[in-house]
Image: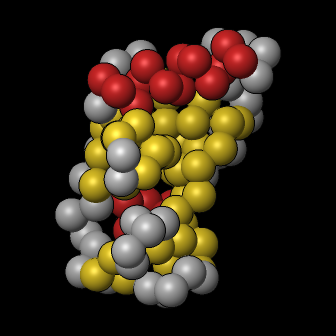
């Protein structure tokens, strides 16, 4: 399962409204090769659910994950920080053995 914190849900709701997206838009979370630790997180809105997608729902947010990315993301929590040390979405991933300083890439 992939979950979202209350802060992440609130920020997602704000972004949906600001970007003029509808309730049909879901959050797509995926993993791509790259970054200083080898793998990078990718987060975007998507209004299409592919047949091979795994769909999770937490706090009313639908999260879409492709099969390849799911192996790296199981158990992950999506959070949002707006503190002095940085602003943006953060991935709390129990599968990551190492992360970079910016928190955008990881390795397993």
Q: Position of residue 104 (x, y in %)?
A: 48, 66
Q: Which residue is drawn at the image coordinates 21% and 63% (left, top)?
A: 94
Q: Picture coordinates of residue 66 (x, y %)?
A: 56, 56
Name above or below for residue 57 compared with residue 54: above
Residue drawn at x 43%, y 19% is 10
Quadrant location of the N terminus in the rendered image: top left
Residues 27 and 12: in front is: 12
- Image coordinates for residue 19, horizontal then vertical, percent: 76, 22
Q: Is residue 8 above or below residue 51?
A: above
Q: What residue sits 29% from the left and 31% below the top? A: 5
Specify how the rendered protein is coloured. Answer: secondary structure
The reply to whether residue 38 is in sight is: yes
24 is higher (above) or lower (below) than 56? above
Residue at figure coordinates x 59%, y 58% from the top left: 42
Quadrant where the C terminus lies? bottom left
Q: Which residue lies furthest to the front in this view?
A: 84
Q: Is residue 72 above or below residue 37?
A: above
**What is the tally of numbered marks visible in this picture?**
0
> Quick check: 92 left or right of 65?
left
Instruction: Please state if 45 lies on the left or on the right of 69 as rendered.
Output: right
Residue 57 in view, yes or no = no
Q: Which of 32 and 10 is in front in this view?
A: 10
Residue 17, given in percent of the width and then of the height, sits at 67, 13
């Amino acid at each position: 399962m992939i979950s979202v914190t209350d802060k992440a849900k609130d920020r997602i709701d704000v972004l949906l409204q600001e970007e003029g997206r509808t309730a049909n838009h879901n959050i797509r979370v995926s993993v791509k090769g790259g970054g200083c630790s080898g793998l990078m997180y990718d987060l975007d809105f998507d209004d299409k659910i592919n047949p091979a997608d795994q769909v999770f729902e937490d706090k009313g947010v639908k999260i879409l994950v492709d099969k390849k990315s799911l192996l790296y993301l199981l158990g992950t929590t999506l959070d949002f920080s707006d503190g002095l040390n940085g602003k943006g979405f953060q991935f709390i991933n129990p599968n990551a053995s190492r992360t970079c300083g910016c928190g955008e890439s990881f390795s397993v």
